[in-house]
Amino acid sequence: MAGLEGQVALVTGGSRGIGRAVVLALGGLGAKVIINYRENRIEAEVTLERLRASGGDGEVYPFDVAVESQVEAAVKKIVDRHNKIDILINNAGVTSDSLLVRLKHEDLDRVLGVNLIGTAYCTKAACKGMIRQRYGRIINLTSVVGQTGNAGQSIYAASKSGIIGFTKSMARELAARGITVNAVAPGYIQTEMTAGLASRLQEEFLRAIPLARFGTCEEVAEAVSFLAGPGAAYVTGQVISVNGGLYM
Ligand code: NAP
């Protein structure tokens, strides 16, 4: 895989989990990586330390992807400092796992607000500069449950299905400007997000995975790195599944 030297990448939710692995992978390929987080500064600083320890370079930027004014201010600051954003990874995500009848209005707003609307806000803010430079890579984290649905995850799954429709639409909107837009759909990956799933659900997933194990954050970061790199220049509007065969 060729390098990303000279490129600037913004990874939302880069402080932990899959986002941290993506930060390290893109940094390892030579990109300068902007690590966004919402509240967990300590974990974001740990990610930055690991990035620097592995020879990479970057900065941490706190902002809430669900608040458009914060997204716009942050993107402006990044572009003022680094001149551009070449790669946007819309990774920040939250869950609220419960039967629909038990979900509160605030849960619906938060999950859709962060996962789907946050992805739209970050894309809208970052793509303006990409359009001007006629180059960009946008990669959105969806989920296997956005492809299959899952009882107890209706709003989370809806937000992730929405990301697939958003990805395909933006791929069409931005193709003529040299910008590719793709999605990565992880299956069951071991992170803090999935550690919170009921053990009954964890066992059910494991039984259904042909490769008979959960995935790692690094395995998801490999797919993201491919889509961010020059080898994926002719790939747009696609959903790449990293799920051990859970959904084919
Ligand atoms: P995670 O470990 O829970 O980390 C979530 C990240 O998102 C953190 O960096 C968090 O920042 C950030 N974040 C949350 N709300 C935010 C907001 N409003 N603004 C900015 N940042 C925010 O999650 P993960 O498991 O790595 O998942 C990453 C992505 O992959 C998500 O989109 C998730 O839906 C998707 N995914 C995960 C799995 C899986 O098995 N883990 C499967 C399919 C899809 P703080 O540290 O500041 O809280």
Image: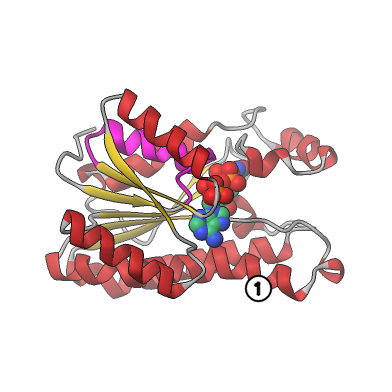
Left or right of 6? Residue 64 is right
203 and 93: which is toward the camera: 93
User: Residue at point 24% right, 63% down?
Assistant: 179
Q: Is residue 187 visible?
A: no
Residue at 58% x, 35% y is 244
Q: Quadrant of residue 137?
A: bottom left
Which residue is label 1 attached to?
109
Q: Amino acid at mark 1?
A: Asp
**Image vertical order of residue 104 relative to residue 157, above or below:** below
Residue range (magenta): 13-31
- Of residue 80 and residue 231, the one placed in the foreground of this image is 80
Q: Where is residue 215? Give x, y as percent.
A: 58, 32
Above-or-below relation of 49 to 172: above
Q: Is residue 124 above or below residue 87?
A: below
What's the coloring here?
secondary structure
What secondary structure is the stretch in magenta mostly built from?
A: helix
Residue 244 can be seen in this image:
yes
Compare residues 174 and 94 and report the one nearer the observer.
94
Q: Kindly identify the residue that appears in the image at 62 percent across and 56 percent down.
A: 94
